[in-house]
Amino acid sequence: MPEEEIPVVDLSNPDEEQVARAVVKASEEWGIFQVVNHGIPAELIRRLKELGTEFFELPETEKEAVARPADSTDLEGYTTDYKKDGQGRKTWADHLFHRIWPPSRISYRFWPKNSPDYREVNEEYAKQIKELSEKLMGWLSEGLGLRRDALKEGLGGDTVEYLMKVIFYPPCPDLSLLFGAPPHTDLNGLTFLIANEEEGLQAYQDNNWVDVKYDDSRIVVIVADQIRRMSNGRYKSGQHRATMDTERTRISWPVFAEPNLDHVVGPLPELISGEDNAPKFKPYVYRDYKFLKMNNLPLD
């Protein structure tokens, strides 16, 4: 049997209905797919990755200039994540978090200052990812039989936030003791991921872990918990994990499209009318949802 591969959707196909059907099918069956010919310039992506890589090559004292404050309840800033799971294995990665949209929610104090281009490149990437995100949410809304802006509005409309996370996974000599990110689903709406050339992302499908084959022309799209909940379970929240390499560094750049913390998200009202359409999920203020999920507390 040929090895399973995650779906790849070519956004340059002139038949938009066919593209939309492919996005819907991948979101129903996998909850993770890749897009090619997505319209985001290759040079912009190259510069984004170059600047992020340069940040992690800085001396620790310079990285600490944008560190997450110890008393912060927010994610923004530079952190080193080092924790054990129940089997004694550890997760080990350095993170840089900062919002890139909307402008009113950006804290430039957490944006690296080592290159004068960092701000311009990230602001342009934010515009491009937001456009791609809204296009995909439009097709997913129509796939539910709803108006094109239904999922965007359900996620918060113009208050939807885009959070950049640059993750640095150092080489690990003993992979049995360490992994980059344990199996999980993302708690936001949609995630858009690019990486350096090292493979390491895996998707869970049909009781198997499937390697996400990656190259510079692709963006990985992960359907996350809030789209699953808004769709009342029609779309899958893609389970995935990140492995590490014994010799090489892996860096990834996920952008998380997520509600504002005070926004309430639940199954869209149009999908839970009538006897056959009982809601499968409770509505939650996003702040509360995040707290419960991040602390492994019961949700529904």
Image (cartoon, rainbow, N blue to C red):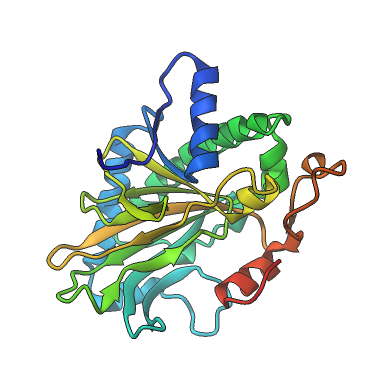
Residue 170 occupies quadrant: bottom left
- Up-down: is 54 above or below 78? above
Question: At 25% across and 58% down in the image, what residue appears?
Answer: 53
Residue 120 in percent (x, y) is at 40, 45
- Up-down: is 85 above or below 212? below
- Up-down: is 169 above or below 189? below
Question: At 50% across and 59% down in the image, what residue appears?
Answer: 185
Question: At 55% across and 79% down in the image, what residue appears?
Answer: 72
Residue 42 in percent (x, y) is at 30, 34
Residue 33 in percent (x, y) is at 42, 40
Residue 208 in percent (x, y) is at 36, 54
Question: At 50% across and 20% down in the image, what residue appears?
Answer: 18
- In the rendered image, which quarter contains the N terminus? top left
Residue 173 occupies quadrant: bottom left
103 left or right of 222? right
Question: Is residue 293 at least partly visible in the picture?
Answer: yes
44 left or right of 187? left
Question: Is residue 115 at least partly visible in the picture?
Answer: no
Taking depth in this image into account, of 221 and 144 the one nearest to the observer is 144
Residue 104 occupies quadrant: bottom right
Q: Residue furthest left?
A: 247
